[in-house]
Image: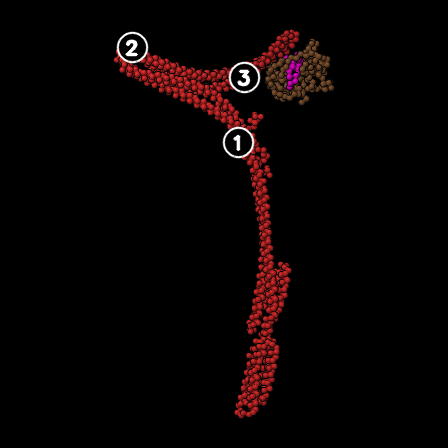
Amino acid sequence: MNEKSVDIEGRVGGWPDSESQATGATNGIDSETERLFCTFRLDGQLFGVDMLDVKEVTTETTSMHIAHAPDEVLGLVNIRGHIYLALDLRTLLGMPETELTGDSRLVLFKPSVGNAFGVIVDAISEIQSADPDSLEPFSPGDHEGLVPKLRRVDLIAAICKLPDELLVVLNPLRFLTIVEQNIATSV
Amino acid sequence: MKNFKLATKMLLLTTILMSSAVIVAFVAVNRLSAVSAQLRQLVDSTIVKANDLSELHVKFLASVRAQKNSVLSPEDDTSKAYAAISRTSLTEARDVLGKLKELVTKDRIEKQSKVIDDIVRAFDKVESVHNAILDLSVQNTNVKARRLLSGDVQRETELLLSRFRVWADDATGKGVATEAQVTRLRALYEIHDRLMSIQPIVTKHIESSSDEEMSIQESKLDDCLEQIKNGLMVASGGNIANQVDVTTTLSELKMTLARITKYSRLDTNNQSTSMSLNESRVAADELVKRIDELENLLLAEAKDGRDSSDAAYKLAVWWILIATFSGILLGGLIAYLVKESVTRPVFQVRNLAQAMAGGDLRQRIPLEQQDEVGELSDATNSLADSLTRIVTQIQKVSESLAGSATDLTGVSNQLLSQSETVSMKSASVASASEQLSNNISTMAAAAEEMSVSVASISSASEEMSVNVGTISSAAEQTSTNVGIVSTAVGEISSSFTDVLNDVREGSRVAGEASRMADSATATIQTLSQSGTEISKVTEAIKMIALQTNLLALNATIEATSAGEAGKGFAVVAHEIKELAHQSAKAAEDIARKIEGVQNDTRQTVQVIQNVSQIIKDINSSAGRISLSVEKQTRAATMISHNVVEADKGVSNIARSIAEVAKAAGDMSRNVAEAARGATDVSRNVGEAAKASGGISSDIHGVSVASKSTNQSASKVHESAERLDQIAKELRKLVGRFKTNTEDTDAE
């Protein structure tokens, strides 16, 4: 827990209130018995985000493409009159692109995570509860604090060992950050 | 060699034949050119040489002849001309000889060169002799001498004689015959005499050829001249002046004579003649001998040439024959090889075709040949393959045909047995009707008898009564018989009707079944449609379950966000989610099952269609049966109708007989009436007999009809059996083809 807070403080200085909220929420649940993760599948692999960060899961995946947007941005999606930015999580994680299918879902995040955005996943899976013991913080470990730039690998927050497979817990706070950073560097 | 194309083989063959022909032609040309060279040599050298030789001979002989002419000719000019001719001929002969020598030296034949050298030597000799003879002959001394003699000597002698005559006249002219004058005349006479004898002496000298003769004549001549000189003194009479011209003339004569003798001494004519006769002859003979020798040699050479050309010809013939034979041998060998490579596979193909014709389809040609024959064998192999396939199919078809034929035979058997039953029944009817007819005949006879009895006997009414009773009982029996017939016919008819009904029922049932099958098909189609609709519904259920699931998820998220307050709601949301999951699974299940049902439905439809087809087949065969049974029913109905008529007739008879009985009761009272009644009876019985005859014939017709039915049934049966037979035969025929599949079956 300590490690994680340090990790977040060290790397993401951008959003003080979202961070405090997130850590607060994490702390709240952590202090209790278990954490809940909204899990989904990408390229057959199981990923998840903390359920407290999720606002909603919708079947609406038809997006309007934005000109000159980076590859990670699929477009804008209209959910009940509100416009959300849809990111392609596959591209973010460096997986090959695929067509949208009937199982494709849009996972929208709370405003505490980022302003009106969501990610497209291949298929939604269960709500997965996990013991803190089974969670293992993921840290690349080598040049901690030396590189101010985020890498794709920094999207991964922890690894959860489930009875039959591994669940990769992502940190949604960094999704938009990494996109913006990429735009800045490419320009 | 095996894998060459046929055309290549033929080309090879042709090439070999052509090359052997070329070789033969080359050898022939070569040998013939050798023969021709021999002949040319023979012609070029030997014949030319022989020609030259004969020309030489001719020239030489011409020269000799000219020489002889030159020698013999007395005239100077002609002699010279002949000599010139002779020289020319000899020069020509020399030229020819030179040419000949050149030829011979060119040919380098030693013997001939030697002989030609001999000839040249002999010719040189002959030429020298010849030239000498010619030189001599040209001089013609005798002729000159004679000319001098006849010219100068004559003139001078004449001159002297005239002088002497003057002297004689002078001596006599004085008229006084003195002694001196006489002496003078005597001397003159002697001188004259001597002078006259000179000429013969000279002539003799010229003529003679020997020296002794000549010297004798010369001495004689000298004597004469001396005497004339001596006599002059006397004769002149001392007159010196007169003597002067005489002496001059005499010396002139003397000189002339000396010239003559000189000429005569030379005697060229005789010399040349003798030379020509001796030396020249010898030389000429030598030359001719040499020439003959050369001629013989040339003949030998010609003979040699002929022999060698003959030998060359024979050699050429041998060469040509050997080349031809070797060409024929080689060509034959190659042709045999080519033929082997073509015919052997062709024979194999023929054997295969024969085996196929004999029904053996298992054989194949194991030929690894790339040419047209190989293709033929491959094609034959594939033909055998396809035949095997076809025969296998035919076998299968014939099997099923045999099955069908067996079925048909069963059906026809059944039909036959039924028709036999009918026939049997109709036969029994016929026999019954026969009996009826007999009975009626009996009855008729009895009635006849009765009529007669009634006519004659009036007292025997008792007997008649008995008789009538007999008739009555007979009529009753008849009635019974007819009743039996009627029953039997009715039975047949009813059994036919039953059969017909059964068949119709069968047909109807089949139609019903077909309709049912159709409706079943329709129902199943509907079922299939319903299944499709159900699957649509399950799709919708699945969709709804999905939505519900998502809703439950979102509800859970909301509940979790609400913290403690939303905990209960989270449980509910979870339950909803579970429910949605289960309903989705159930919908999945239903969809799967519906899919199975639809598959079954499709199969069922297929099966029902097959069944429908079978029912249609049954229906059509039932229709055929129905047709034949209807025919038979019609016949039976006709029988029945006839029997009913017979029954009616018999009833009539019975009624009439009853009437007769009644009349017989009255007869005792009125015989006349009875007699009338008996006549009626007789008439009625006659009618009955007629009717019963009709029945009998009708029933016979029925019997015939039923027999014909039976026959047609038998024919059907026969046809069925024949079909069966044909099926068996077909199977047997097909069985004749031995195929590999059969083999494996057998194994």
Left or right of B371? Residue A168 is right
* Marker disc for residue A150: none
**Residue A136 percent across, percent down from the top left:** 71, 15
Q: Are marks 1 and 2 in contact (CB under 8 Å)?
A: no
**Residue A175 percent across, percent down from the top left:** 66, 17
Quick one: which chain is red? B
| Chain at numbered mark 1 | B
Q: Earlier in the sequence, mark 1 or mark 2?
A: 1
Query: Which residue position is annotated with label 1?
Result: B358
Query: Which residue position is annotated with label 3?
Result: B600
Quick one: which chain is brown? A
**What amino acid type should be assigned to the residue bearing mark 3?**
Asp
Seen at 68% across and 14% down, the residue is A163
| Chain at numbered mark 2 | B
Q: Is residue A51 magenta?
A: yes
Left or right of A172? Residue B313 is left
Give the vertical position of B37 relative to B461 (above or below). below
Q: Which label lies toward us, 3 or 2?
A: 2
Q: Earlier in the sequence, mark 3 or mark 1?
A: 1
State the predominant SS element of the stretch in magenta. strand
Seen at 68% across and 10% down, the residue is A34
Q: Crowding near pointer 1: few (<14 within 10 Å), some, many (20+)?
A: few
| Chain at numbered mark 3 | B
